[in-house]
Image: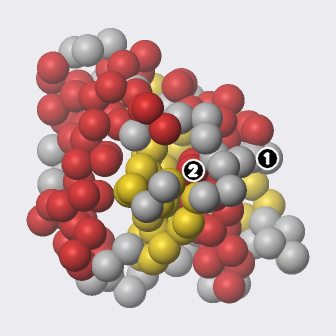
Amino acid sequence: MDASIQICKATPADAGIISRIVERSIRVGCALDHRNDPKVVATWTRNKTTEHAAAWLSDPQLHLNIALLEDKPVGVAMAAIRGQVAFCYVQPEWFRRGAGHALISDLEVWLHQQGVHLARLNSTRSSEAFYRRLGYRVCAQTFTVAGLQAIPMHKVLPSCV
């Protein structure tokens, strides 16, 4: 993990950059999943606008964090108080530098502080190995949503997260 990674709670001023990171990560980093199908990409990104990010940031049931590497925003992640990790996106050129791991670790600490003991998420094919390395395990049948395969996974959060 890169020592210069900082994880910060996202603020309303971050809504635009959050939207841009998510959209670019989907378009470039998740090509294995959407196979450059414009309809699938459009469906996947349509609820990832600056306005959506601003709404997420104002919802007290959500925790949205941002990763800074060399003082540049390189990734974002979000979880819901009920234990669902909604997403973790990192700019493709910053893959494998520890930002995703740091983002998920921060979400897990927050979830544990909320009394959650089991984190859940739906992974894509391109992210499955990443989540497995973090201790997530497949917990149900793969299903298709909006032209994408979703892999239900979960992880028991240790008491000392």
Q: Classify 10 Å Cα crowding around label 1: few (below 14), some (14-19), many (20 and above).
A: few
Q: Classify 10 Å Cα crowding around label 2: few (below 14), some (14-19), many (20 and above).
A: many
Instruction: Classify mark 1: helix, strand or loop.
Output: loop
Q: Quadrant of residue 139?
A: top right
Label 1 sits on what residue type?
A: Gly
Q: Earlier in the sequence, mark 2 or mark 1?
A: 2
* Residue toward you, 123 or 18: 18
Q: Position of residue 62 (x, y in %)?
A: 42, 76
Instruction: Classify mark 2: helix, strand or loop.
Output: helix
Q: Is residue 87 visible?
A: no
The numbered disc on residue 99 is 2
Are the residues tagged 2 and 1 within 8 Å (C-beta)?
A: no
Q: Quadrant of the C terminus?
A: bottom right
How far apart are labels 2 and 1 at the CA level?
A: 16 Å
**Residue matched to label 1:** 135
Label 2 sits on what residue type?
A: Ala
Q: Position of residue 90 (x, y in %)?
A: 45, 44
* Residue toward you, 96 or 151: 96
Indicate left or right for 104 with 34 as reference: right
* Residue toward you, 98 or 33: 98
Q: Position of residue 130 (x, y in %)?
A: 65, 36
* Residue toward you, 152 or 97: 97
